[in-house]
Image: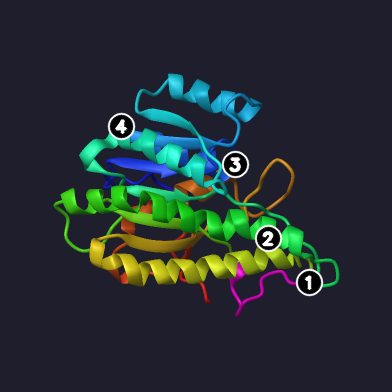
Amino acid sequence: MAKSVDFSVFSVLVTGSDRGIGLGLVKRFLELPCPPKWIFATTLDLNGKEGKALKELARKHQNMVVLQLDVTNLESIQASVKEVQKCVGEDGLTILYNNAGLLLGNNLEKENAKDMMGVYSVNTIGPLQMSQAFLPLLKKAAQRSPRQGLSCSKAAIINMSSISGSIELMFLWETFKFIAYRCSKTALNMLTKCQSLGYSASGILCVSIHPGVVKTSNREADITVEESTQGIMTVLSMLSEEDNGAFVDWLGRRISW
């Protein structure tokens, strides 16, 4: 798939970006013909193997900043807001990409409160708290943008969802129960819809994206991280006001709620 050529973004923050799809997204932003002035990549552990690899990548790109971030911890979130604010100033944050996620869960017989709350804290509450904390910076980006309507080049919250959260489709139910994960992504989709209604007046686009069934280090799947993230970048470049509050996949196709 060809790279997006008409996609200008001042700044972007991607949570959970030290591996997998998150890392792929960071690399795609770095590869843009006109890359963002600021790319914020986050990791739970700056000194861990993946955190160090992320810092090594940042040494090669002056526009990339690595932040320690736990999306379930308000103090950690507020600390990241302060660091981003220092860099972007009055220009604000163009895209908040809530990518960090937890793929856990049990079948109906074994699902339990502890596991379910753990998954919800990352997959649903995390994006809520991140969006609340970064809202002032997103509003600044929207206010300073000369663009009309809604777009990812103006200001956007992108929530990484999953086709597993579609109530209508119940994708791979027979082989992939994971009750907590499915429910958390369904709830995330509702959050996206609520955000689209609550933030559009401030010029902020809100969309849920399913990245595809992606091959990672421990599972086989349909597409690679590079294919998924390149597709997502193309979708981001094309999203407009009519997509606000939508649930789409990595190729831009609408997914049933």
Write the residue at 44% across / 37% down: 79
| Mark 3 neighbour density, 10 Å: few (under 14) some (14–19) many (20 or more) | some
Instruction: Point out the frontmost of discs 3 and 2.
Output: 2
Q: Earlier in the sequence, mark 2 or mark 1?
A: 2
Mark 4 falls on what kind of element? helix
Query: Which is nearer the N-term, disc 3 or disc 2?
Result: 3
Separation of marks 3 and 4 at Cα, in angstroms: 26 Å
Q: Nearer the viewer, mark 3 or mark 4?
A: 4
**Which residue lies at the image location 44% right of the left edge and 19% below the top edge?**
59
Q: Which label number is shown at residue 20?
A: 3
Are the residues at dot 1 and dot 4 in contact (C-beta closer than 8 Å)? no
Q: Is residue 51 magenta?
A: no
Q: How is the image coloured?
A: rainbow
Task: Quote the CA–CA distance across marks 2 and 1.
Answer: 24 Å
**Can residue 50 be seen in the rendering of this structure?**
yes
Q: Which residues are magenta?
A: 164-174
The residue identified by callout 1 is: 174
From the image, tell me which residue sits under label 4. 87
Which callout, 2 or 1, points to the residue nearer the camera? 2
Q: Earlier in the sequence, mark 3 or mark 4?
A: 3
Q: How far apart, in angstroms, are the residues tagged by discs 3 and 2?
A: 24 Å
Residue bearing the label numbered 2: 117
Disc 3 is placed on an element classified as helix
